[in-house]
Amino acid sequence: MELVSPLLPTVLGDDEYYNLADSDLMLQFPVETGFLFEGEIDRKRFLHALERALSAFPLFCGRLRTASDARHPWGIQLLNQPVEVEFIDAPDNDMLPRDSVIQDPWYYSPPLDIDAIRVCKDTALLKMRVINFQTNPRVTTVGATSAHLIGDGSFMTKFWRHPVDATCLEAWDRTELEEQFPQLLARNPSTQLPNSQRITLFFSPTQLTQLREILSKRLQDANISDNTIKLSVQDCVTALVTTACSQALAEMKSTRGPVKFISNVLNLRGGILPLDEPLNALSWANATTSSPFDVVQTAVAIRRSFLTAREQTYQAACLLTIRRLWRDAADKGEKVDFTPLANSFLLNSSWRFDYTSAHFGFGQSKTHFLHTVSKFPRYAKMFKRNPPLRFGKEPQPGQERGPGGAEFTFYLLPEDRVAFLKCLREQFKALGIAGEIDV
């Protein structure tokens, strides 16, 4: 028997209580999950990885509680208690799993005292078992029984990726995770809006296609990455804009330096949260580029940041951190500061989302989405372009356009505007993209 405690501090830091949603109160059910491997688990490495996994999933080390005051919800008291892990050398192969998913009887994890959990006794919410079978080749099973109230089978699979996958032995302590969300750490922004000017860039569907194809071809020719990097349209447009910002600052000999940090707000729906998750489901994908003047390298850095941020175990740890930081600001009566930091650019949207699907019965071709954007410099939003207006003045020759394309809007300081547009147009032309950017 081994007792494994979470590596401290956990992603929930100094929090003492985690509120459960009403839909989590499946008090009478356990969740039993396990895996079989052809091979032997490295015991020391496994336990080390489990410490880090529990640091990212500290609810497993807590205890169910409910306050006597009915206004308070059910929740998990965050005690960081150790988890029991049994190691068994099977004397024979009678307990070997059958060649199926469903196993009956179930040998592969210890039972929980569900009745004690239901009445909030000091009872473990997770127990684990490792069984080594004397087969040829050797076979190992790793299993866990957890309380359903802290996660279903899908959630348990995310947890398992930490201790079982040899490539997931790294975890993130509280400081590392918080550093991914500097906007939530900065508090009480200035109420004085900067003297900035809006820039709205319109890209045609043809230009978007050409931009992505050209950058993807240069990526392939330069052999910068393996074939897992597939640039999106949003990656390419963001890289085009941020490198133009960097080039403009360099031409102006500005002391503010190039754009090295690019944050994209990330929708967690369809990842660790369901597609129909209500209210808010946002995280961040943070890119750092070592080549702020190279549009291809910058686009690759952005894409890699999305791949990292969408890894589901990492998402789960980030979501707990985000919730804690939002709650911390609310409890203290503070405002978070989303002003882009020095040398940074923030894109707070996803251009692929179809906002005109709310068309009130008039049809999407007759619906225009209307929105706002912060006036802080280098805070951007990107959307699919609205369909052409069917009223008002007739367009002048050369202004006619068809449906589709993208709109990229952000604010810059007035002294940066001319140099930025010059660099953007030069870069557009150098890439060989047809036509001019509509500004």
Image (spheres, grey):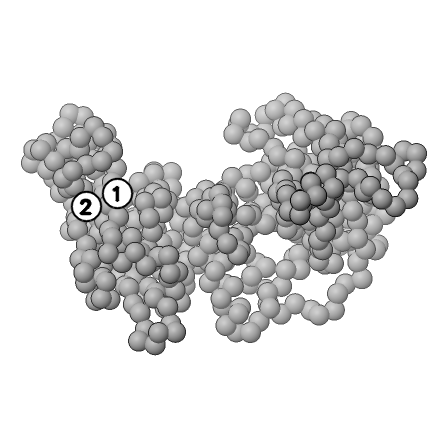
| Mark sitting on residue 33 | 1
| Circle 2: residue type | Ser
Q: Residue furthest top?
A: 221
Kindly identify the residue that appears in the image at 7 percent across and 36 percent down: 91
Q: Residues within 10 Å of mark 2 (few under 14, many from 20)?
A: many
Residue at label 2? 109
Q: Residue furthest left?
A: 91
Which sits earlier in the primary sequence, circle 1 or circle 2? 1
| Mark sitting on residue 136 | none
Query: Percent position (x, y) of residue 88?
Result: 13, 42
Q: Is there a contact, CB below 8 Å, between mark 1 and mark 2?
A: yes
* Residue 248 quadrant: top right
Kindly identify the residue that appears in the image at 72 percent across and 27 percent down: 210
Query: Percent position (x, y) of residue 75?
Result: 34, 65
Q: Is residue 50 left or right of residue 347?
A: left
| Circle 1: residue type | Thr
